[in-house]
Amino acid sequence: MPLITSFETHATVILHTDSSTLKGHGMTFTIGRGTDIVCLAIKEVANRLIGKDVETLFADMGKTWDYLLADPQLRWVGPEKGIIHLATAAVDNALWDMFARSRKKPLWKLVSDMTPEEFIRSTTFRYITDAISKEEALAMLREREAGKADREALVRRIGYPSYITSAGWLGYDDDKVAKLVREAIEAGFTHFKMKVGANFDDDYRRARLIRSIIDNPKYFPEDYSQPSARSLEGKNAGPMGCVLMMDANQVWDVDEAIKYTKGLASAKPWFIEEPTAPDDILGHAAIRKALKPDGVGVATGEHAHNRMTFKQLLQAEAIDVCQIDTCRLAGVTEVLSVLLMAANLIDYIVVSGSMERNVLEYASTRFYTDFVN
């Protein structure tokens, strides 16, 4: 059986084995400065895998993940947060990629084909058993096993729903926003996210502009079919079945977030994303409680360090939408644990649960060229 022999890293990581046909590619996400520091951390984490038999690792990915995070000296520069966690994400993601390649399946299919017992062995339950135990997770997965084939068939037939942000970046003039929103409608999008927080008057005007387009039938093709009522439940969808979302990128204190978002509530956003510091669990809970009468939800998770942060957000009823980043969390293994908690504690989450209810973020080439331009 192949043994891991070496690795390469460039904020991505390639795990090599002594088999010329088996490698694993993983990544974490950085936006520029600090990438070299993350690369150094990746080397430290990846070193723990040298000489390990891959089939032993694959047989219990939860145990493998626990081993990756068990070095006491590396935990000192975490634990399970910050740069060392970003680095662990790259290595764990590379292992999952290698696992999927070894089985000649895409990653989603590898996970989908797992039995409930295999799924349980593929994630970690450390520090979260007060939110969901292995026994509870196993029972839930067994209960949902019966409909798995139908859900896979649906994904294969129609793809997975997604939303677009590139129409709503700060700094765009109104003409560009309008043009990009119309193009997104033509491409089939029904969920649109805009950035907010720099200037209230500008945000209010842009929100009304986007609404004026996504709620107007003249901008839709004649054969347009609205999303199902179930998929739009609780999302403040307009008459054309389109949904507006807002993202503040942690810009406000709690009271400011409440006041600012209430001022935008007439634009009927589904949620306000990252309204305050990502570590402020009780702050998010206060914002959610204050915005509930306005029909606006709260979303966060892009900068949630680890599963324990998500556990507290869920237990405190601080969020309506759980947003998971496979590079902020320590890879696929930890993502699976958050999916289990969220499925156990709230009705719907972004990235998991009922496909009808959820949406993935779509990042086109424009996403990258806009930053350059």
Image: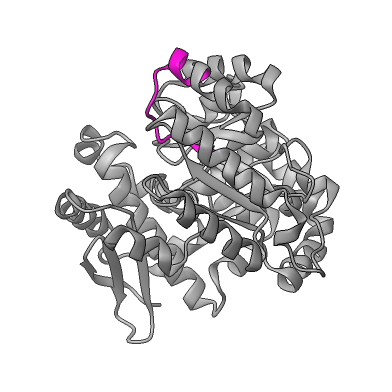
Residue 181 can be seen, yes or no: yes
203 on left or right of 182: left
286 on left or right of 12: right
Which residue is depicted at the point 45% across and 28% down?
200
Q: Nearer the viewer, residue 224 or 84?
A: 224
290 on left or right of 202: right
Tell me where the magenta segment starts and ends, as one range: 246-258
State the image quarter where residue 329 is shown. top left
Q: Residue 168's spot in the image, x, y percent? A: 48, 49
Does 249 lie within the magenta span?
Answer: yes
Q: Residue 288's spot in the image, x, y percent? A: 59, 21
Q: Nearer the viewer, residue 13 or 163?
A: 163
Which residue is depicted at the point 58% across and 21% down?
262
Q: Quick check: 149 above or below 263?
A: below
Q: Nearer the viewer, residue 77 or 216?
A: 216
Residue 133 can be seen, yes or no: no
Q: Residue 52's spot in the image, x, y percent? A: 32, 64
Query: Which quadrant would the C terminus be assigned to in this image?
Result: bottom left
Q: By what rule are the colours in the image chosen?
A: one colour
Which residue is depicted at the point 75% across and 68% down?
221
Which residue is depicted at the point 33% across and 56% down?
28
Q: Residue 222's spot in the image, x, y percent? A: 81, 69
Query: Which quadrant would the N terminus be assigned to in this image?
Result: bottom left
Does 235 lie within the magenta span?
Answer: no
Q: Quick check: 78 above or below 20?
A: above
Count the marks: how many?
Answer: 0
Q: Quick check: 287 above or below 121?
A: above
